[in-house]
Amino acid sequence: MDFKDKVVIITGAAGGIGKATAKLFANEGAKLTLVDLNKEGLEEVVSELNLSDEDYIIKETDVSKEEQVKEYVDLTLNKFGRIDAFVNNAGIEGKVMPIVETSDALLDLVLGVNVKGVYFGLKHIMPVMMEQKSGNIVNVASVAGFIGSPGMAPYIASKHAVLGINKCAALESASFGIRVNAVCPGPVDNRMMESIQESAAPGHGDEVRKQFERDIPIGRYSTNEEVANLIYYMSSDKSSGITGTAYRIDGGMAAK
Ligand SMILES: NC(=O)c1ccc[n+]([C@@H]2O[C@H](COP(=O)([O-])OP(=O)(O)OC[C@H]3O[C@@H](n4cnc5c(N)ncnc54)[C@H](O)[C@@H]3O)[C@@H](O)[C@H]2O)c1
């Protein structure tokens, strides 16, 4: 097993992609720190994956609050003593609305979770990996880091920012034997896309989905499991030699 007794932190672990990723790592023997705002969701993941007490930590965390980020890192070090992989995945979609109508509060919320949350995770985990002289980090960005989309400016801005931070983190840590890469999904068949569809056209989410699907060359959304497979690959030694990149998993959407 690739991750036998390796220590992996996953944020947003109660969500669609986070949970599918936790499952893959658990099957490969990893010790897991699962972080999310949604504590009940984390408890459900632990019971669904049938994790043993000695193999996991769950930590209710708002990743946009630096002191809470430090807590999940400290808890991990106290219990497991090291961090081998970090899946910096928690994120929110915000609401679909034009720039001219966006409130300061919505902008702060989306940038707070998606940009500061990612940044604080790196700020507190990179020093641990630098001291170990090893570690793999995956920042979950989005195809929204490559293209624009009307009504999604805060989210689009946040994911472009993640790709910039991703490059800096890779450059600052490469000489310590740490790799940092971004995984960039297009629309995924889960709660977040349902929320975006419904926010774009209340009561007509299914039609919005059809429009999205017409825009995707493979004609469908990705699955949580497909995204998790790429995160797993980028976190494992199978991708040795790759750092500072951003891999899209978008059914060809941004190739046009
Ligand atoms: N679903 C998609 O279509 C899609 C596409 C591209 C990128 N992504 C990205 O994938 C990542 C995972 O999203 P998902 O698709 O699994 O959606 P999701 O909504 O199922 O999962 C996101 C998780 O993050 C958690 N979260 C939200 N705010 C938080 C905070 N402040 N602190 C800690 N946890 C918080 C939520 O509780 C949730 O469990 C996100 O970064 C998202 O932007 C998703």
Image (cartoon, rainbow, N blue to C red):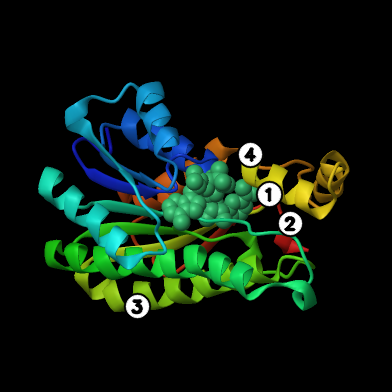
Decide: few, some or many residues near mark 1? Use Cα within 10 Å; few <14, some 14-19, many ≥20: many
Rendered location of residue 232, percent (x, y): 41, 44
**Disc 2, SS:** helix
Residue matched to label 3: 171
Image point (20%, 27%), residue name: 53
Residue matched to label 4: 190
* Marks 3 and 4, the one that precedes in the sequence: 3
Contact flag, marks 2 and 3 (Cβ < 8 Å): no
Q: From what the image shows, is residue 105 above or below residue 94?
A: below
Mark 4: is the Cβ under 8 angstroms from ligand 1? yes
Q: Is residue 102 left or right of residue 116?
A: right
**Disc 1, SS:** loop
Rounded to the nearest angstrom, the CA distance separating label 1 from label 4 is: 9 Å
Image point (70%, 59%), residue name: 95
Task: Please name which of the two marks, 2 or 4, marks the residue nearer to the observer.
Answer: 4
Rendered location of residue 55, percent (x, y): 21, 32
Residue matched to label 2: 253
Query: Residue 103, labelled with which disc?
Result: none
**Disc 3, SS:** helix
Contact flag, marks 2 and 4 (Cβ < 8 Å): no
Say which amino acid is labelled 3. Leu
Query: Residue 187, labelled with which disc?
Result: 1
Rendered location of residue 180, percent (x, y): 37, 64
Rounded to the nearest angstrom, the CA distance separating label 1 from label 3 is: 29 Å
Q: Is residue 87 left or right of residue 245?
A: left
Say which amino acid is labelled 2. Met
Decide: few, some or many residues near mark 2? Use Cα within 10 Å; few <14, some 14-19, many ≥20: many
Evaluate whether residue 17 shows in this view.
yes
